Amino acid sequence: MPMGVSGITGAGSLPGLSVRAWVLFDGATGTIRKQFNVAGVVRNSAGNHTITLSAAMPDVRAVAQLQPQFGSAGAVTVGASIGSTTTATVLASLGGTPTDPTLYFVALHG
């Protein structure tokens, strides 16, 4: 089978490129705006959020894509920890201070 869109969605031989979950949420509240395979987002503290998946990933060897949007300029630092096949914790800071993004997009690939 030729590689293409069907491979990315699971019908072919590219399982490593599959997006297992993604979410766009409000950083100050954790309110989900749009999502795929995400049951909820909890704001633990400023810039620290836990994402719970609806369906588990195959394993914890996932890649997190993080895109925070801030209302002001500064050095942005982000990080992710895949704690289990059903949760991920994401961190964001602006200028070295943990800060809630205005909007936060997170995708988990694996």
Image (tube, rainbow, N blue to C red):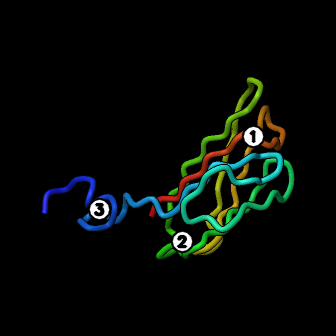
**Residue type for callout 3:** Leu
Asked whether, in this view, residue 107 is left or right of residue 76, the answer is left
* Disc 1 to disc 2, C-alpha distance: 25 Å
List the residue tagged with mark 3.
14
Q: Quadrant of residue 56?
A: bottom right
Measure how far apart labels 3 and 1 are at the Cα level.
32 Å
Q: Quadrant of the N terminus?
A: bottom left
Q: What residue is disc 2 on?
A: 60
Give the number of the disc on residue 101.
1
Mark 1 near mark 2, Cβ–Cβ under 8 Å?
Answer: no
**Looking at the picture, does residue 96 appear above or below residue 38?**
above
The local secondary structure at tag 3 comes to loop
Mark 2 surroundings within 10 Å by alpha-carbon count, few (fewer than 14), some (14 through 19), many (20 or more): some
Residue 108: % across, % down = 53, 58
User: Which residue is pictured at 70% across the width and 61% down the height?
Assistant: 89
**Left or right of 52 in this view: 3:** left
